[in-house]
Image (cartoon, helix red, strand yellow):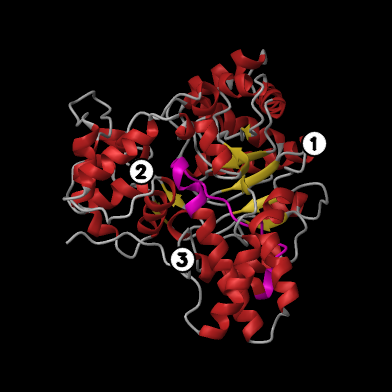
């Protein structure tokens, strides 16, 4: 007998009846607020072209590293689910076959946030009412594929259906932003903006660093081969992004290290980096200096600065060799913030017109370092539980470990940080439910009055992100 796919109305809310009733009241007031998605990795071209999405596999499976890292961990070759090889070798191209492989292994996702998000997408968006299994896989595939051919499932229509108010993508400083320009000049009212991600031109270990810096010079008309010209080129490029809607930058550094070096030391590090003659220590020092330089530029141009440190990227060397970056083989590592950020904070920590949002993959730093830092420095705010911890338990741990020291208002609400466009409503719904569960506990414990909890719930779901990322306009 085929099992039904249902979404319980009280999912993720507290099991205690009294506390659950409080959470229900809080959630009812915020569940339909517009979605602010201030940081993510969707493709601006989708909305510029507004073409139908290709098929269920390439929409829901192939781009989602949460999906294929789990499959690979259980012995499924990435070639079987259509992940492109760097050497052009053969991979599965039939989307139905990829979907069947996914369905055969769906049980692996029990207890994971991927299971929650995917069930939400299937149930709420595609009206699927049976559980995904090898036996139901083809029928579900056909139901999704049929919907994707209709106008209501084109990117712009889905943007509107999801209640999105702002959707932010993330681009390299070398991107021409042609699709953002097309959106800016179109008559569509959706707001899809970019964020400035300078990693390819500020990380000496990034593939093609020297060529990337040269291209930066070509794009800006500045001599990017010397330190001063390089900084001017970055400033010019930031203005280009601002003209295309950017309100933030994003920095995916291996660590949170910052530096405040003298001019001669900066020139020396830059010269060695361009020549490819830098040591690992010098690369780290250069990246640290560039975080401080980016903060200096943000103080001038107003872009909100996001720092996403602590990921040991491309940890699986064989996967990186065969498939390249971003195939789910990034692993969290310990990150020290108190000492690492001191040079930047000594220079800029007390500025009133600079905003730096800190993320972490090191949960041990929440109460020991991050909450106390954000609780004293005006420039700092805490980003939400991120990546591996964008999950029910991760979100609750985040609130429990940071609120008593940083409060709610030194945080920035929620962002989904995803390439999986269709999962955005599911992720925000999960966060809203969990924040209401946490607030309901405070009310039930008489640590917060319910009228205040309603106000905080609205702030966490909507207002804080809008304010922190300067999206009021």
Counting residues from the start of the chain, the first of labels 1 and 3 encountered is: 1
Find the distance from the CA under tag 2 to the CA under tag 3. 26 Å
Q: CA distance from mark 2 to mark 1?
A: 34 Å
Q: Residues within 10 Å of mark 1 (few under 14, many from 20)?
A: few
Determine whether 102 is above or below 238 in the image.
below
* In the depicted structure, whether residue 305 falls above or below residue 176: below
Q: Residue at x 47, y 69 (%)?
A: 12
Q: Quadrant of residue 168?
A: top right
Name the residue beneath numbered marker 1.
Answer: 300
Q: Report the quarter where the C terminus lies.
A: top right
Tell me: residue 113, above or below residue 55: below
Identify residue for label 2. 314
Say left or right for 41 vs 299.
left
| Residue furthest right in the image | 352
Q: What is the crowding at mark 2: few (fewer than 14 residues within 10 Å), some, or many (at least 20)?
A: some
Residue for badge 3: 392
Residue 207: x %, y % from top left: 42, 29
Taking the image as drawn, is residue 93 in sight?
A: yes
Of the image marks 2 and 1, the number of the one nearer the N terminus: 1
The residues colored magenta run 404-426
Q: Nearer the viewer, mark 1 or mark 3?
A: 3
Which of the 4 image quadrants contains residue 180?
top right
Measured as percent of width and height from the top left, residue 211 is found at 49, 20
């Amino acid at each position: 007998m085929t099992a039904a796919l249902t979404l319980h109305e009280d999912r993720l809310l507290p099991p205690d009846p009294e506390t659950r009733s409080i959470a229900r009241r809080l959630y009812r007031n915020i569940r339909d607020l517009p979605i602010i998605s201030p940081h993510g990795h969707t493709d601006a071209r989708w909305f510029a072209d507004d073409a139908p999405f290709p098929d269920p596999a390439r929409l829901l499976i192939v781009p989602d590293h949460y999906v294929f890292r789990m499959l690979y961990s259980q012995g499924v070759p990435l070639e079987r689910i259509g992940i492109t090889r760097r050497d052009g070798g053969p991979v599965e191209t039939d989307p139905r076959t990829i979907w069947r492989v996914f369905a055969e292994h769906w049980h692996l996702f029990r207890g994971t946030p991927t299971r929650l998000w995917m069930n939400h997408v299937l149930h709420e968006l595609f009206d699927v009412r049976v559980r995904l299994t090898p036996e139901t896989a083809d029928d579900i595939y056909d139901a999704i594929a049929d919907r994707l051919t209709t106008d209501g499932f084109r990117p712009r229509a889905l943007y509107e259906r999801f209640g999105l108010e702002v959707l932010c993508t993330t681009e390299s400083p070398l991107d021409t932003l042609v699709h953002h320009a097309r959106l800016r000049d179109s008559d569509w009212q959706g707001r899809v903006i970019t964020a400035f991600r300078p990693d390819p031109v500020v990380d000496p270990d990034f593939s093609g660093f020297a060529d990337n810096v040269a291209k930066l010079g070509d794009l800006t008309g500045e001599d990017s081969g010397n330190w001063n010209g390089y900084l001017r080129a970055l400033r010019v490029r930031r203005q280009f992004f601002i003209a295309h809607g950017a309100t933030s930058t994003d920095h995916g550094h291996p660590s949170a290290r910052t530096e405040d070096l003298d001019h001669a030391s900066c020139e020396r590090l830059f010269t060695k980096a361009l020549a490819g003659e830098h040591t690992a220590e010098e690369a780290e020092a250069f990246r640290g200096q560039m975080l401080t330089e980016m903060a200096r530029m943000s103080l001038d141009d107003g872009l909100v600065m996001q720092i996403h440190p602590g990921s040991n990227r491309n940890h699986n060397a064989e996967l990186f060799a065969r498939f390249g970056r971003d195939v789910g083989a990034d692993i969290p590592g310990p990150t020290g913030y108190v000492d690492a950020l001191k040079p930047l904070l000594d220079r800029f920590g007390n500025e009133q017109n600079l905003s730096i949002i800190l993320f972490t993959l090191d949960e041990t730093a929440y109460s020991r370092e991050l909450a106390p830092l954000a609780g004293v420095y005006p420039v700092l705010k805490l980003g939400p539980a991120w990546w591996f911890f964008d999950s029910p338990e991760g979100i609750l741990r985040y609130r429990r470990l940071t609120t008593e020291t940083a409060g709610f208002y030194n945080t920035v609400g929620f962002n989904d940080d995803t390439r999986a466009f269709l999962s955005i409503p599911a992720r925000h719904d999960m966060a809203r439910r969990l924040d209401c569960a946490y607030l309901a506990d405070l009310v039930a414990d008489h640590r917060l009055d319910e009228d205040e909890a309603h106000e905080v719930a609205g702030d966490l779901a909507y207002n804080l992100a809008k304010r922190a990322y300067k999206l009021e306009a």
